[in-house]
Amino acid sequence: MNHEYLLSQIHCPSSLKRDLKQWLKAGVLDNGVFEDTETGTPQGGAISPLLANIALDGMERIVKEMYPNKGTTTQVNLIRYADDFVVISKDLEIIEQCKTAISEWLKPVGLKIKPEKTRICHTLNPIEYEGKTEEPGFDFLGFNIRQYPIGKYQSGKTGGAASRLIGHKTHIKPSNKAVKAHTEVIKGVIRKHKTAPQSALISRLNPIIRGWSNYYSGVVSTEAFNKLDHIVWEMLRAWKV
């Protein structure tokens, strides 16, 4: 991220802007190795998400200006959280043009879309894109969003007075990556408490498990919860032995 561009977007007293610039340029210490920070914001920094929101403010407007709503029909939506975002549209051509426009818009910000972290996919069906088969659905903020074909008795419906069956249903559930990461955290805690009393291990695990469960409790998570319940039980049995 270009520091000068970021600072130009922040409207605050000059003394505060000066402190912010010094913080951005202060460098980071990673495993005892000091590195300069000429660009970007420190990963994990307390205000890094806020600065990302400031730097990327306007991205949504670019997309909406290109493809404004047609009456009650939405042509495209962009959902962003700090520097993570998804663009949703029924039209593949709109998605591709938005990707090009966003790439150009990001250049003065000092950012670019990483190909390895970018996917173009359909939420219901597999598609062939750039020589690869892209499976349906996508991950965003630890969730997997996907649609599944379903019978008429469970099918989702369109809104409005002329409601009709659409033949599929949207499921949001914990992503496989999020489940794996949570498992690794639990494993690490159990490993560190190998010789600790049972009460100490329980008091350390409970808030981690409770927090993760609360985060995903509002989506389709029964399968993931059952899987994790079994995995944690197996790890605790091995710890006891």
Image (cartoon, rainbow, N blue to C red):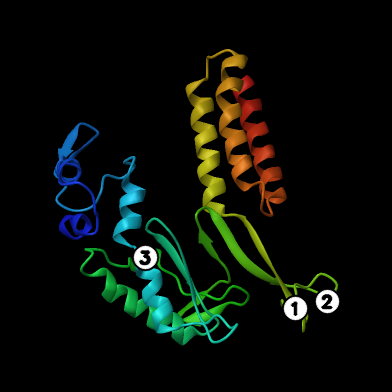
Direction from residue 30 to residue 187 in the image, left or right: right
Residue at the image point whose x is 54% and y is 46% from the top: 180
Q: Residues within 10 Å of mark 1 (few under 14, many from 20)?
A: some
The three-letter code of the residue at mark 2 reads: Lys
Q: CA distance from mark 1 to mark 3?
A: 32 Å
Q: CA distance from mark 2 to mark 1?
A: 6 Å
Q: Which residue is mark 3?
A: 116
Q: Amino acid at mark 3?
A: Glu
State the image quarter where residue 173 is shown. Answer: bottom right
Circle 3 or circle 2, nearest the eye: 2
| Mark closer to the observer (1, 3) | 1
Is residue 110 among the parts visible in the rendering? yes
The residue lying at 56 percent from left, 53 percent from top is: 176
Percent x, y for residue 67?
44, 83
Work out whether residue 224 or residue 213 is closer to the camera in this orientation and state it.
213
Residue type at the position of mark 1: Gly
Residue drawn where x is 24% and y is 33% of the image: 31
Distance between the alpha carbons at the discs numbered 3 and 2: 38 Å
Q: How would you rate the neighbour count of disc 3 (Cα within 10 Å): few for under 14, some for 14-19, many for 20 or more?
A: few
Q: Which residue is mark 2?
A: 152
From the viewer's side, name the closer residue of 125 and 235: 125
Residue 48 position, x and y percent, is 32, 47
| Mark 1, residue position | 167
SS type, badge 1: loop
| Residue 87 on image: x %, y % | 46, 72
Mark 2 and mark 1 in contact? Answer it, CB < 8 Å.
yes
Q: Earlier in the sequence, mark 2 or mark 1?
A: 2
Q: Quadrant of residue 109?
A: bottom left
